Amino acid sequence: MNDIVKQFEDAKLARIEANGKDAEFQKQSRDWLEESMRRYYVYNFSWLGRPIIQNPIDMVAMQEIIWDVKPDLIIETGIAHGGSLIFSASMLALNSTCGGPADAEVLGIDIDIRVHNRKAIEEHPLFNRITMIEGSSIAPEIITLVKAKAKNKKRILVCMDSNHTHDHVLAELEAYAPLTSIGSYCVVFDTFVEDVPADVFHNRPWHPGNSPKSAVHEYLKTHLEFEIDKSIQNKLMITLVPDGYLKRIS
């Protein structure tokens, strides 16, 4: 690394560290996120033609993770309209042109894959990298299918974005987090549920105290092979995934 590049990287790391200590900036970011969710902001975007119900800022972080990890399998719980599957498939396709695994693929699981969504995903040009399984992500028979798919993979990235209740997310973590490769991530989406008022979620069953973040902290009590990568949320500031970027370290 030459001196100019090192100076750039050092300055970036200093900014990120400062963000983590800036309580006022963090409050402003949390307040903006709350107001954006009240306005269904994350429903406004698509990726290569399919709706993607994600914060665009988190999508940048996912691009960075996929580039660094170069997974040959991305496991995603929760499909909805399929935008996230298409996003992951497109990142894997780009990786493959830059020396990443040529046969990298995405596995999506959802309890209810709507007919029109399935059709649109199957007709997409990137469907050749996608497999879908319909069923509960925490059902034993579904877990068995996912583990079989992961069996011969070398670098696995896991993303959880289905039912956001504590018990469901904790069950997903117990089932799928162990498939995460060392150096890769298990990303638990919508951990921000813990940090904003319950009425933000329009009568959904999840709320503070019964959220993905509460499940993450429960899981980490007995799974020291993972740590929260705070540098990602401190870089993003506006994120649906506070304390949810879990890096496997052993």
Image: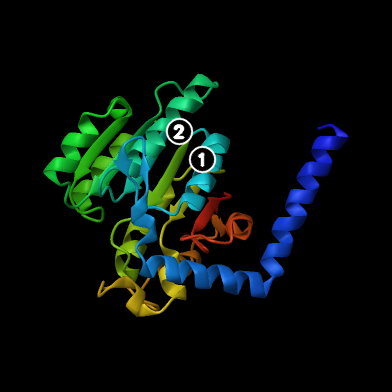
Q: Residues within 10 Å of mark 1 (few under 14, many from 20)?
A: some
- Asked if residue 153 can be seen in this view, the reply is no
- Which quarter of the figure is the N terminus placed in? top right
Up the image or down, 134 lies above or below 127; here it is below
Disc 1 designates what residue? Answer: 63
**What's the residue at 34%, 70% (across, down)?**
166
Q: Nearer the viewer, residue 39 or 34?
A: 39
Q: Position of residue 187 (x, y in %)?
A: 45, 53
Up the image or down, 80 lies above or below 230; here it is above
**What's the residue at 34%, 46% (across, down)?**
76
Taking the image as shown, residue 161 lies to the left or right of residue 81, namely right
Asked whether the beta carbons under mark 2 and mark 1 sit within 8 Å of each other, the answer is: yes
**What's the residue at 54%, 61% (across, down)?**
238
Q: Mark 2 to mark 1: distance in Å?
A: 7 Å
Disc 2 designates what residue? Answer: 91
Mark 2: amino acid: Met
Q: Residues within 10 Å of mark 2 (few under 14, many from 20)?
A: some
Up the image or down, 3 lies above or below 78; here it is above
Q: Nearer the viewer, residue 44 or 110?
A: 44
Q: Position of residue 75 (x, y in %)?
A: 36, 43
Taking the image as shown, residue 234 lies to the left or right of residue 60, namely right
Q: Nearer the viewer, residue 250 or 86?
A: 86
